[in-house]
Amino acid sequence: MTVPFKPLKIDRLTPKKPHGLVVVITGNGKGKTTSAMGMVLRASGHGLRTCIIQFMKGDLYTGEWDGVKLLGSLAELHATGMGFCGIQGNPYSHAEHRVNAQAAIELARTRMTGGDFDIVILDEINNALQLKLVDLEQVLELIKEKPELMHLVLTGRNARPEILELADTVSEVCEVKHAYQKDIEPQPGIDY
């Protein structure tokens, strides 16, 4: 017999002083994008609008593309990347990847300053920076130009110290063990 879940009536907490945060999710473990997507789900529950811009993903399907559509007008996702530059047999040149990443920077600036979003997520921007698809100065400018009450989330491995310094919250995802070490293929809904 299943007992229906009855949530406690809890009043929503409202901060005395709202503050838009800069959140960095970095590290070599799996789960950085997944964590950011969890923020999208949570924010949607509060009626907040989120824009996700994926700097590297775009050549292989991932479940969040269709999952975000289920949130309707509360979230939009732009897979601007051409795949992971220089790995997995990616056929595009560094110059082609950089052109796309530069367009993603401009899209981020537009979405941040347009006033339509409460949260902007720059997924894999740290990887794009490490690969020199975007420049450190561009990323620092985005952080500094962030509207006061908007939250900005940056994901990807090897976040630069200058970015960590400007962040309000930094989480590092550490790989302890991964199924690929047992030759288990990526699984839908978990890995992509």
Image: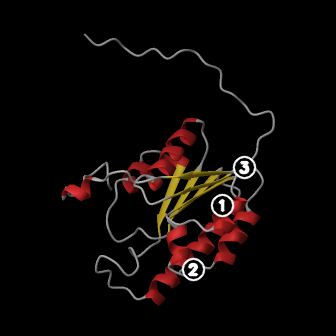
Amino acid type of the residue tagged 1 in the rendering: Leu
Distance between mark 1 and mark 2 Cα atoms:
22 Å
- Image coordinates for residue 70, horizontal then vertical, percent: 42, 45
* Circle number at residue 178: none
| Foreground of the two, 177 or 6 | 177
Q: Which residue is mark 2?
A: 102
Q: Residue furthest left?
A: 183
- Residue 109: quarter of image: bottom right
| Foreground of the two, 93 or 163 | 163
Q: Is residue 187 left or right of residue 123?
A: left
* Circle number at residue 164: 1
Dot placed on the residue nearer the N-terminal end, 3 or 2: 3
| Foreground of the two, 10 or 31 | 31
Q: Residue at x 55, y 47 (%)?
A: 74
Q: Which residue is mark 3?
A: 20
- Can residue 175 be seen here? The reply is yes
